[in-house]
Amino acid sequence: MVPVVMPTYARADLAFERGEGAYLFATDGRRYLDFGSGVAVTALGHCHPRLVAALKTQAAQLWHCSNLYRVPGQERVAAKLVENTFADTVFFCNSGAEAMECSIKMARKFHHADGHPERFRVICAEGAFHGRTLATVAAGGQKKHMEGFAPVVEGFDHVPFGNLNALRAAITPETAAICVEPVQGEGGIIPGDPDYLRRLRATADEFGLLLIFDEVQTGMGRTGSLFAHQPLGVVPDIMGVAKGLGGGFPVGACLATEKAAKGMTAGTHGSTFGGNPLAMAVAETVLDVMLDPGFLEGVAARARRLRALVEEACGRFPDLIEQVRGTGLMLGIKPRIPNTDLIGRLAANGLLTVGAGDNVVRLLPPLIIGDQEMDEAVRILSRTLGEVAL
Ligand SMILES: *Cc1c(COP(=O)(O)O)cnc(C)c1O
């Protein structure tokens, strides 16, 4: 008989009843160090006091009113995002896939409004992940995500990530946009070369294309800056954000320049729940915490420390670990055993991590991770590698 919860996930047999900072407490009484953060979502750890307070206060005032009316929380969050990014305007939704749907729709609409409805194709990268809706699985281009869901949404071309010549060769008169993750997340923690990302901007400008960055996973402090592209000297026209934005409350956003969003007029796009007062109260507080002076610098410093510790620990097991890579608090360990094996053993020893493509184990600790917690995680990692090596 089918489980009452549709079995679309390969779940570990663990359930949690409480979270506090970097720790999760399971129903079996065990405590786990959470280096998965619900896949880069609980960026400020579990039950951050300021987020709990913001949500409780809003919950006693107003939950939902719809986008038939002004939502002051949206105006505040959008203003903060605009003030701190390339963007001029923001659309709110509830997930990363929706943020990317909006990005793709906006790119098509831009060229349509520009008198070029024939320009609708988006060039994406091999190994990409943009979500699980029909359009975003087509954008991701992974066979395993499209299998059985034909016909595939039309209009996505794929080129190897990091290969500018291949990308330029894929541009046709029908191309509307280029869409990449600055660091491929689900694909296996593959950082885009800064020079490649900068050249994407120049290429987009040369051919009149829009540049879309999917910062659903890399954004909101994960790489040590508010958004991963910001220290690289490159700006997109459109950007999808979600995961860390709500710190665990479901919320997404699509940011754009005024020019890129010129076709997005009243009635062109919408979402019933998008940017509702609860989501906005939490997102505003997440942004306030991350924009507190010194917070992001602290993330970068913690990331350097963790990277050094993880490299040192893994370096002692060259037969077991092929590579450590990533940026900021988005690290990938590539073992020579199946990543699922290592993830299972780490969890058994009290450390939660997340798998990714290319047989990678992702470390995505909360951005507030403390030195002692890092040390504990690395001790568990070392012990686990030692057990495997036996
Ligand atoms: C997780 C993710 C998405 C999809 O987000 P959902 O909230 O699961 O829809 C899209 N793009 C990237 C880069 C992601 O990591």
Image: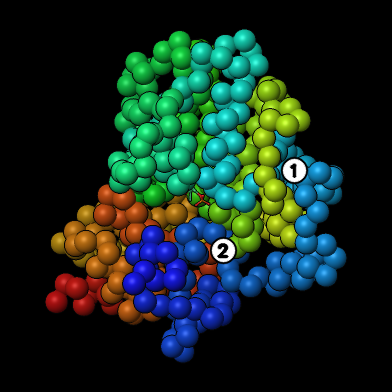
Residue 181: x and y, percent? 46, 39
Q: Earlier in the sequence, mark 1 or mark 2?
A: 2
Task: Name the residue: 57% across, 44% down.
Answer: 98
What's under tag 2, amino acid-wise?
Thr
Task: Name the residue: 19% across, 62% down.
Answer: 337
- Give the residue pinned by disc 1: 78
Q: Nearer the viewer, residue 55 or 349?
A: 55
- Give the residue pinned by disc 2: 42
Residue 289, placed above or below residue 380: above
Residue 109, placed above or below residue 358: above
Give the quarter of the figure containing the N terminus. Answer: bottom left
Q: CA separation, marks 1 and 2?
A: 21 Å
Place residue 380 in its image quadrant. bottom left
Task: Name the residue: 77% across, 71% down.
Answer: 56
Q: Mark yes or no: residue 379 visible.
A: no
The local secondary structure at tag 2 comes to loop
Q: Nearer the viewer, residue 197 or 187?
A: 187
Residue 264: x and y, percent? 69, 28
The local secondary structure at tag 1 comes to helix
What's under tag 1, amino acid-wise?
Ala
Task: Name the residue: 45% across, 47% down.
Answer: 132
Q: Is mark 1 in CB contact (under 8 Å) with mark 2?
A: no
Place residue 104 in its image quadrant. top right
Q: Nearer the viewer, residue 75 or 375?
A: 75
